[in-house]
């Protein structure tokens, strides 16, 4: 697989790809232009790293309530999404990276719902012992993880990509609201968002819905 193919799977620019994997920018340019060829061991390493960065972003089905599993704190028992997420993290008792709607709550771009049941995370499969937890993957690149007061969560680019990958199962209200806030807080532009090519067409439709979100 060519370097450009690997890079576009991530939705990175050349400079972002170079920074992500600590490769000189000029080297990436030369590889993609065919001026030089990366050593075979470098290609194997890059392919493995990129598979880790992209793996398990899709989930097949949503969990149903299981009386044999442990319960997490309820959203409607907390004033403020961050207080609830901290309680969820403490109850889980191990490191998780919040994803999708929970990541948007950490961003401050979505307030969530009072009857929230699902909790989307990257983390160990052991956290499935709790009702409502959906594990998107066991690992996510550190380049896509932010920290807010001890809460780890995916950055907006990764969150949007994960949402589009799981759209058939996901209520897209949170993503639409977050995109609308982004648009109007960035001079009515989506500049800065990096969308994987396979999701670009759907994102364009979603972007139009987001622009109209607060107009309706």
Image (cartoon, rainbow, N blue to C red):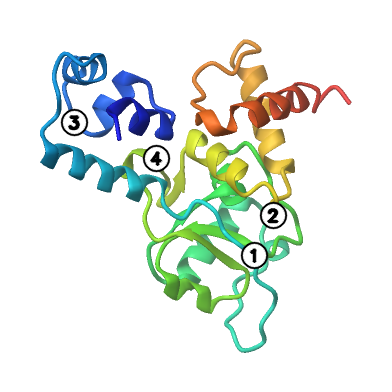
Mark 3 to mark 1 CA distance (whole Å): 36 Å
The mark closer to the camera, 4 or 1, is: 1
Q: Earlier in the sequence, mark 4 or mark 1?
A: 1
Disc 2 versus disc 3: distance between alpha carbons?
A: 35 Å
Query: What's the distance in space between the residues labelled 1 and 2, CA to CA?
Result: 7 Å
Q: CA distance from mark 4 to mark 1?
A: 24 Å
**Label 2 environment density (alpha carbons within 10 Å; few <14, some 14–19, many ≥20):** some
Instruction: Tell which of 56 and 146 is nearer to you.
Output: 56
Residue at 30% in and 19% down: 15
Which residue is found at the position 65% from the left and 27% from the top?
Answer: 201
Mark 1 and mark 2 in contact? Answer it, CB < 8 Å. yes
Q: Position of residue 28 (x, y in %)?
A: 22, 21
Task: Tell me which numbered mark, 2 or 4, is placed earlier along the sequence.
Answer: 4
Q: Of callouts 1 and 2, which one flags the residue occurring earlier in the amino acid sequence? A: 1
Give SS at disc 1: loop
- Quick one: 92 or 50, which is closer to the camera? 50
Q: Secondary structure at mark 3?
A: loop
The residue under label 3 is 22
The quarter in which the C terminus is drawn is top right
In the depicted view, which residue is nearer to us: 56 or 119?
A: 56
Residue that badge 2 annotates: 169
């Amino acid at each position: 697989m060519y370097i450009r193919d690997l890079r576009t799977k991530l939705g990175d620019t050349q400079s972002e790809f170079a920074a992500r994997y600590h490769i000189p920018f000029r080297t990436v340019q030369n590889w993609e232009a065919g001026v030089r060829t990366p050593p075979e061991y470098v290609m194997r390493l890059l392919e493995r790293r990129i598979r880790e960065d992209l793996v398990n972003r899709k989930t097949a089905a949503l969990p149903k309530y299981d009386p044999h599993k442990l319960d997490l704190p309820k959203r409607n028992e907390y004033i403020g999404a961050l207080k609830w997420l901290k309680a969820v993290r403490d109850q889980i008792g191990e490191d998780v990276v919040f994803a999708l709607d929970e990541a948007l709550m950490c961003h401050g771009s979505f307030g969530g719902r009072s009857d929230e049941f699902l909790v989307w995370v990257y983390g160990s499969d052991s956290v499935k012992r709790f009702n409502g937890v959906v594990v998107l993957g066991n690992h996510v690149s550190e380049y896509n993880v932010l920290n807010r007061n001890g809460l780890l969560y995916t950055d907006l680019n990764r969150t949007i990509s994960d949402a589009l990958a799981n759209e058939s199962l996901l209520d897209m209200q949170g993503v639409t609201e977050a995109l609308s806030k982004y648009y109007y807080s960035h001079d009515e532009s989506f500049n800065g968002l990096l969308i994987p090519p396979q999701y670009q067409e759907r994102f364009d439709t979603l972007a139009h819905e987001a622009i109209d979100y607060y107009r309706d």
